[in-house]
Image (cartoon, grey):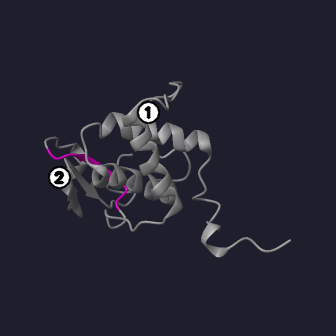
Amino acid sequence: MTAEPSHFRRPSTLAATLAELMALALAIRDEARDEAEEGRLALAWAARNRMALFGRDPCCGAKGERPDFADAAFCRAFAAACLAASGDLPDPTGGATHFHLHTDEPFWASAATPKALIGRHLFYTLDNRTAAA
């Protein structure tokens, strides 16, 4: 038996299960329904970055909801979740772990500098002292 190709190997802390990818896709679908692919991918990367920094279950709402693979918005969100999990595309957020709509101002954002504005969301890299997950 041959060794697994290196492009399939990921650190175990970033390996997402199918259930986690589907939960992430549901959250992306709801948060980025009107976003272009770049916005969906940025949200997926921020969740991946959170998972790497804080551990499992990085975001995800829509618990218990069953994914609908006939729903085009879910499929686009699932694709973004898979692309971020694979690491095949670069992180457009620059390592961001937090985000919010550019029209909102959560309490933690006043003490932070945004790293990127992608679609309708501002993205931040926060440390544990500044951030409220």
Residue assigned mark 2 = 110
x then y, percent, for residue 23: 50, 37
Kind of element beneath mark 1: loop
Of the image marks 2 and 1, the number of the one nearer the N terminus? 1
Is residue 3 rendered to the left or right of residue 86?
right
Judge by depth and name the residue closer to the eye, 93 or 2: 2
Position of the N terminus by quadrant: bottom right
Question: In this figure, what is the number of numbered marks?
Answer: 2
Is 98 covered by the magenta stretch?
Answer: yes
Is 4 covered by the magenta stretch?
Answer: no
Kind of element beneath mark 2: helix
Is residue 127 rendered to the left or right of residue 14?
left
x then y, percent, for residue 56: 56, 48
Residue assigned mark 1 = 61
Residue in the image at 45% along x and 48% along y? 79
Give the extent of the magenta segment. 96-102
